[in-house]
Image (spheres, rainbow, N blue to C red):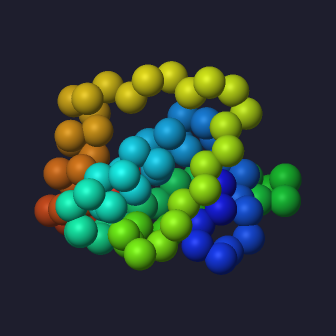
Amino acid sequence: MQYGDGTPTVVDDRVLARVAALHDVVRTTGHSFTVTFTNNLNGQAGQTTIWLNPAIDLHAVYESEPDPIDHHELTELTALGLALGDVTL
């Protein structure tokens, strides 16, 4: 995943699919919020928080075909982001 002009970050396909879906929501609604997720940067596990904003591009590259995201799950994640300003995956 590459967010904006930042350094590419290795993210699990399942998490990446949710970040990408939430980014689509942000782009269509005009709202912004943070998303925090576990990543594997340079072979070391860590945690990343990004500010999802409609003006910042997201480039997602999957290692395999990601599993479909349940509509109910995406609705819940979106509600959390809009209500609390943060989603933790």
Residue lying at the far right of the rendered structure: 43
Q: Residue drawn 42% across and 61% down?
A: 35
Kindly identify the residue that appears in the image at 38 percent across and 72 percent down.
53
Q: Quadrant of residue 42?
A: bottom right
Q: Is residue 39 visible?
A: no
Q: Is residue 21 above or below residue 59?
A: above
Q: Residue at x 67, y 37 (%)?
A: 62
Residue 52 coordinates in the image, percent (x, y): 40, 67
Give the x, y percent position of residue 10.
72, 52
Q: Is residue 60 above or below residue 35?
A: above
Can residue 82 be seen here? The reply is: yes
Residue at image location 26% in from the left, 29% down from the top? 71
Quadrant showing the N terminus? bottom right
78 in relation to 33, above or below: above
Q: Position of residue 56 (x, y in %)?
A: 48, 73
Up the image or down, 2 lies above or below 10; here it is below
Image label count: 0
- Relative horizontal placement of residue 5, taking residue 32 as reference (left or right): right
- Measuring from the top left, give residue 43's x and y in whole percent: 84, 53
